[in-house]
Each structure stands twice: as structure tokens, then as C-alpha cells.
Amino acid sequence: MAIKAEIIAVGTELLLGQITNTNGQWISEKLATKGIGVYFHQVVGDNKARIKSTLSQALDRSDLIFITGGLGPTDDDLTREIVAELVERELIENDEMLTQLKQYFKQSNRVMSKNNYKQAQVIAGAKIIPNPIGTAPGMMVEYQSSLLILMPGVPSEMKYMMTESVLPFLEKNYQLKEVIVSKMLRCIGIGEAQLETKVKNLIEQQSNPTIAPLAADGEVALRLTALANSKAEANRLIEAKEKELHALIGSYIYGSDEQTLTEVVIDRLKEKNQTIAGAESLTGGKFADQIVSIPGSSRIFNGSLISYTEDAKISALGVNRSTIDQYGMVSKQTAYEMAKRAQGVFNSTYGISFTGVAGPDPLEGQPVGTVFVCLYHSDKDYLIEKFHFSKPRNSIRALSVKKGLEMIYKYLK
Amino acid sequence: MAIKAEIIAVGTELLLGQITNTNGQWISEKLATKGIGVYFHQVVGDNKARIKSTLSQALDRSDLIFITGGLGPTDDDLTREIVAELVERELIENDEMLTQLKQYFKQSNRVMSKNNYKQAQVIAGAKIIPNPIGTAPGMMVEYQSSLLILMPGVPSEMKYMMTESVLPFLEKNYQLKEVIVSKMLRCIGIGEAQLETKVKNLIEQQSNPTIAPLAADGEVALRLTALANSKAEANRLIEAKEKELHALIGSYIYGSDEQTLTEVVIDRLKEKNQTIAGAESLTGGKFADQIVSIPGSSRIFNGSLISYTEDAKISALGVNRSTIDQYGMVSKQTAYEMAKRAQGVFNSTYGISFTGVAGPDPLEGQPVGTVFVCLYHSDKDYLIEKFHFSKPRNSIRALSVKKGLEMIYKYLK
């Protein structure tokens, strides 16, 4: 018999529309990959009677009940108490939790107020879900034939608990017969419509695995989803379909699943023992930030110089004033000098530069959305591309970085 | 008696986590401004029995039942049929709808398939909600004391119907004397529990406006929500409570509603005609990126130097090797020199530096999460703070930037 799961989000701010219940979507996606069927999502406010009735209904119809939110220190955080009541157990202050809590506050130099002690309370007999990145520990409580899983509403903490504790626990303790395996094939340098046309036949014949084209953040991807009785079988189905797709669009595929273009580019540079440095104008550090967000990037990234004003380009970066005077800040000549200087200043294999008009106003008569990106290796070996993005300011900045990464990726290929 | 609303989203793709139920958030937000309280969100799959039980439960407890999704042309679009069954009415093909539907397909040069005829079916006695931008018309059906509002799941179509038809209808036909006005007071430099303790009395006596503490991204906020017969009256209530709160915690409040700390800091610098430059190590451009993301920041921001490696700190930024050798890259001495150099290189009023251990591994014997931030104005006038964040790599980096902004904010105050 298939396991029935239900996801309940607790919090009046959700019912007031102040935040979106993204936890429901995230948990559902993860459970789907384990072949666990989610039958209901519910959102209920910080109201004792309504939380209680929602939970009792869930206990009647669901095997796994995921509850997010209501574990905070404040008086309107009710989940802990109500679940204890429903499963007829005591709430006990847990010494270990209290110690961890005190430690957490000590380390983050924050004052632990009386209310926080509440967060060290644990339902008798519950399995504690560690939460090293927050104050509220989670809990798993068995009651009758159901398992209640209590987690904080803060997405980062919930995701940590799911990945580190809850999902492994479910895999170990439940017979998860059917498995759904999904794989994303990430593409670059092709539009969604164009991609769909190329794989149209495969999509039309699709049954298992299914193929769905997705577009986001200037990239497109294909999601393959296979259903089978074993992970091995599902993977076989995916691999087979993947081969077909590679034959059709292999040249556009740069990676799969959670892999990002940034990671792929960093790995390529590591393989070649090469380094890169940046000179950023309109992107204002976004390129560097994306590189540095990946652990271990220091091996390939020395630094980036953000010269947001003309003077900074000249004084800090060392671009010739004459170049800017003659061609303007937003020009291929300035882009070239910026990239070349970045390579020199940081003494790297490559320099990459971003200069353009993020808006709201045009610059030097160039329309908003005009961007030059230069990838420099030597005076004989460099690339300059001009782009135009008809997007809002911060999309222009993000797409510029994406195009820069694409240029590096293609160059290193 | 207050009107009770409930929002039900129908669609298996939501339970598979392929999409997020943003409709629930959007509808809730709109209803809140009309003083209509939303008590539950539900998501149910394309399954007849479960949709039926979910809807009957809603009919028992809610006055307004918003149902999104399941109005499409395919066989798993069940909402129309099930609602007709529940309210004991016929489904009738509506000529007007059929004409519109045919027209729609003609205009968009699409072939109208046999399934689409289903979308011209209307529940007897239902009020039709026009949908010029899609194929599925919506419906409003009264049953017993409840009103069921059927809309497509496609956000753009649902939003069009809500704005053009449903909200005006509710205003006209329901005594919506009350309006709800919300205001967020954004605080910095205080934890959620600590904040709640300070305003505990106000929260305990609270009735209207209500006060709710919220925490996110290293910041806390108080949400005031006032219910009144007019917007003016609601605003008066909010202002009055705001005064009381300012008296108690004014020193922690930096802004309100959508205002960000970054914007406030930029405005302060503009007022003073001062400029700032950065020297970033572990933050790797995140500080600069946040500043540059705000239009017009070039007036106060010259640039930032991202020196991710020791050599870059020395060669590009000009920190003394001896300082790094003696005290290490992650030290207050290095933070001081970085900030001072940033100010000099970019010839700004202030320099701010970030150096620390983002992880995954410790550095120079310093544990992951150790961060030094220095705000430099002159050799006699600078601040250095040491932080420890027990968070994942990118949270450490984000919190470092937040603390830096907090230091600037307090200094300029």
C-alpha cells in the first residue's frame, strides 16, 4: 500500500499572503523522488482550535504528516504544544537541547531570552531532528499508524533537516517500493522553443520517462522523470532516454541536476590549473559573488575589481583615460582594457570584464540593456561580445554574468 | 460576523512539487486588504473523491470558497463536474461561451480541439466570470450560505478575473465595511525573542492593531495589522501604535514595509554627500552587488576590491605582507588595512572591509564563521567588529554583509 503524505504549514503570515508556502513545494518535490505520494497541502493560521482540527484530520487520513512552522520562541508558536496534546504526551525540557541552544546563542553573540527556553522543550518519546543552523530543533513523533514530522518554517532550516535527517530516516524505515527518479539536463546557448522543436518527436512519444522543457534565468533545461520499482530500473530508463537526447542536442548540454554553469566553469578551470579575475562595472560584483559562493573557488579565482565610476576605472583599475574619452565607458575598447588589466592586476590566466548600461537611464547615448563582455587571455587571444537585454536593471546585471560564464564555458570547451 | 474565506488549489502538479501555489498567496493578500479573513489554504490533486471531500469540508466551514485549477479541457480537469454535483445543478453548454471560445482560438490561430467544448459548459445558475485572456471562463455559484468561486490555475488568468470581476463583485454584494492595513517596522541589532520581550506588554494588550514579530535573513520586523471601517481610520490606529513602539524600541527601527537596510544606508550617504568603497574577501562582491542593485547608487559607491587570495590582498589591494604574516588574513589588523586601502584606492569617504572564514574548512586555525568587518574613515575614526556565525557558507557571507550595513547605518546615525 502506498504511503500517504500530507504537508501542513502553520502561520498566519501565509494566510495574510505576506509569504508564499514554498516549503510545501520543496518537500513535495523531494518526497516525489522517493516515490512517496503527497495527497494534501494545508495552510492554517496560528490558531489553536484550527491547528488542532487540521492535525486530527491529517492523523485520520495520512501516514506521514509534515508540519512546518510554529516552533519559534514567541507565544503564537503553538505547534509543539498542540502536537503534544494530540499525541497525549508530555512536553519535557531537554537538557541536551538547552545546552545546544545556549551554545548557539553564545556563538552568535546573541542574548538568549526567557522565551527561547521554550525551544528546548521536546515531546516525550519524540526523535529529535538536529538543527545546528537555527534555534528550534525538529521532532519526529509516532502516533497510532502515523508519523508526525515537526520542522521550523524557515526554509533553510527545514531543508537542512529534511536532507540530513528526515529523508535518510524515511529511506531506512519505510518500504519505499515505487521510485520516481528525475534528472535535469541543463542547456546553454539555445532558446526554449528552439530546444522543444529539436526534441519534439521525443516529447510526443514520451511515456516513461517523461520529458518536460523548462526555462529560467536565461537558461533552458529538460526534466526527465522516470517511474519504476527500483532506483536502478528508473536510472536505466533515464540513461536510455538521455542517450537519445544527447544525440539530438548534446552540444547544448553543459550539466545536469543541481549543477550550475558557475560550478562547471570552475571545474574546467581547476582541471586546467588556470585562474581568472574580473573587472566589473554594471555587474558590480555579481560575477565574483557567484564564483565565491562555490566552496573551493579560491583555487581558480584571485579577485575582481569593481570599478563602478569612471574615476575608479582609471585610478583603481588603470584603464587609460584616453580610451574612455575616445570610446566611452560602455565600449568594446574599454571592455578590452578592463579585462586585460584585471588579468594583469590579479596575475591570472584570464581576465573577464563587464561594462554596460543597467539603467534606469541611458549612458553615453547607449540604450539601457547594452552590455559588453570581454574575456582576455592575451593580446592575440581574447573575445569581446556585445549584448542587448530588454529587461529590468537587475535582470540585465544577472544575464550579463550568465553570458560571461557562457563565454568562458565555450572558450574552455 | 466576519466573512470566512478558504482557498483551494486543485492540481497534481502542485502535490508533485513541480510548481508552487503562488495563487494562494496572491488571493490571500488581496482579500486581506478587503478585510476578508482567510482561514485555510488547501491543495488537492486531480482526484475526484479527494476534491469532493475537500470541497464539502469547505462548504461546511467557509463563506467564500476560492477554487483555482481543474477548469482546463483535459480529462483530469474535474472541478467543473464535481462542483456541479455538490451543488446539485446541471452542467449546460453555454452558447455565448462557446462563441467566445471559438473566437479565442480563431484570434490566437490555434485549432480548437473537441475537448475544448467542455470549457463552454457552465453550472446552471452560475454567474460567469469572463476570461478574455484564456480559454476557461470562471464561475461564481451560490450554495446554501456559501459562495464558490471557480477560476483557472493559470496565475495571469486568475489575477485578471479577481481584479476585473470577483473583487468588485464582493465589494458590491458583501458588507465589506472593514479594511485591513498592515505595516512592517524593520529592526536591526536585536533578536526576535529579545524584541518580543521588549514589546511583550504591547503584544499582550494587543487587539487592534495586532503586533507580530517576524524574523528573516538576520533581521527582525514587527508587523502591525489594523482592522477598521476606513483606510484613514486603519492608518490612524497604526500610527498611534507605531508611536508607542518607537518609544520602546525606536533605536532598533531602521525602516518600514519594503524598505531595505541597503536602501536606507545609501540614502544616508546621499544626504551627507559621502561615498564608500569596499574591500571584500569572504563576501566576494556580495556587499558591492547589494549596493549596485539599487538604482542611483553610483553617487555614493565608487567600487570594491575583491581580493580573494592572499596575493591579491597584497598585490591588488596593497595590504602589507608583514601584517598578514604576523596577524593572518582573518584578523582585525588585516581588516583595518583592507578598509583603509579601499578608502584610499577609490578615494572615498569611507572604506569597509570583510575578511573571514566562510568554510567549509577552518582557516589559519580560525573556526568557520569567524568574520572581521572594519569601517574606516580615518586613522582616528574607524570601527572593527568580530562576528561568529554558526551557519552554512553562503549564509555566513550574507550575514557578514548585513552586519557591515548595520555598522554603517549605526555610524551614520
Image: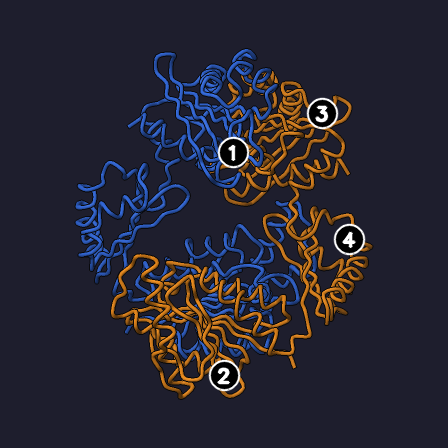
Chain colours: A blue, B orange
Q: What mark, if any, has residue B168 been given in the picture?
A: none
Asked if marks 4 and 2 fall on the same chain, the answer is: yes
Residue at 45% x, 28% y: name it: A298
Mark 4, chain letter? B
Please tell me whether mark 4 sits on a helix, a strand or a loop: helix
Residue at 24% x, 36% y: name it: A251
Q: What mark, if any, has residue B249 been given in the picture?
A: 4
Which of the two discs, 3 and 2, labels the residue nearer the N terminus?
A: 2
Asked if marks 1 and 4 fall on the same chain, the answer is: no
From the top left corner, tell me how far across and down residue B213 is, in percent. 67, 59
From the top left corner, tell me how far across and down residue B70 is, in percent. 37, 70
Residue type, label 4: Ile
How far apart, in angstroms, are the residues tagged by discs 4 and 3? Answer: 30 Å
How far apart, in angstroms, are the residues tagged by discs 4 and 2? Answer: 49 Å
As rendered, which of A75 and A311 lies closer to the eye?
A311
Mark 1 — residue? A368
Mark 1, chain letter? A
Q: Is residue A74 above or below residue A269?
A: below
In this rendering, which labeled residue sits more in front, label 1 or label 4? 1
Residue at 30% x, 50% y: name it: A213
Q: Is residue B258 above or below residue B28?
A: above
Which of the two discs, 4 and 3, labels the residue nearer the N terminus?
A: 4
Screen quadrant of the N terminus of chain A:
bottom left
How far apart, in angstroms, are the residues tagged by discs 1 and 2? Answer: 51 Å
Q: Can residue B34 be seen from the camera position used here?
A: yes
Residue at 27% x, 38% y: name it: A252
Q: Can residue A91 be seen from the camera position used here?
A: no
